[in-house]
Image (cartoon, rainbow, N blue to C red):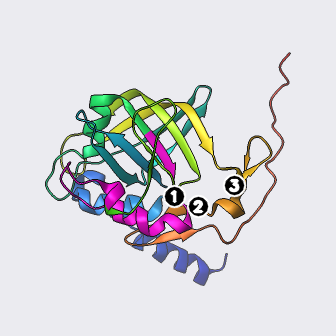
Amino acid sequence: MNISAWADARIKRLNDMEINPTTLPHQSIYKLLTGAILPRPIGWISTLDASGRPNLAPFSFFNAVCSNPPTVLFCPLIRGVDGHQKDTLNNVRATQEFVVNIVTEELLEAMNLSSVEAPPDLNEFEFAKLTPSASQTVRPPRVAESPIHFECKVREIVEISDQPGGGSIVIGTVLHIHVDERVLLGADKINLAALKPVGRLVGNAYSRVTDLVEIVRPKHQLSETK
């Protein structure tokens, strides 16, 4: 590296931002997290409250955990508008059940409508003009328009913080999976081109899967087990 390149690299390092999370407000930390960890899959979670009223809300702090037993998680944050827990968290605490509905390009607008902050008596299925469909193993309804559903029983709820900016981890065991045949390849593969999933970015931005890069994973370097 010549002197000029070394100086440029040195200046860049000096201009880098080193952050102690305790020195920034949680709103800034949220922006850094959601601006860097992306695209994020969206768990469109349907639940019932203790009175049987339906709720539907999207969560981009969502992912799979493992396949044996099949397990997923999502993370409802403390509501920013009033500092209260989200209805979804209250519902899974009360009923111990939820359904994950997968969001597609065609359902993006409806999913966005269902994200509205509203009182518990608002029916997001009706608000977003979606069709509730009876689940096979749990009481919360599925979104009929979604091609994939995971019906779940709550395994554990881990509360991280009940303060503004805080949240909980809801871990669910998948009891039943529904896959529309139009997005299925064979017995156990999803047709990505047919599914057209949507990912969450930052602010009002979302991503579509329109540009793929395939790369072969390196062969493992572990000893073969007997």
Q: Which numbered disc, 1 or 3, marks the residue that appears first in the sequence?
A: 1
Query: What amino acid type is highlighted by mark number 2?
Result: Pro
Which mark is drawn over residue 197? 2
Residue highlighted by disc 1: 103
Residue highlighted by disc 3: 183
In the picture, the quarter occupied by the N terminus is: bottom right
- Is residue 110 within the magenta segment? yes
Query: What amino acid type is highlighted by mark number 3?
Result: Val
| Position of 69 relative to 19 (above/below) | above
Q: Position of residue 29 (x, y in %)?
A: 31, 58
Instruction: Specify whether residue 160 is in view.
Output: no
At x 56%, y 32%, the residue is 176
Instruction: Specify whether residue 164 is in view.
Output: yes
- Magenta part of the chain: 99-126
State the residue lying farthest toward the left. 82
Q: Quadrant of residue 81?
A: bottom left
At x 28%, y 63%, the residue is 28
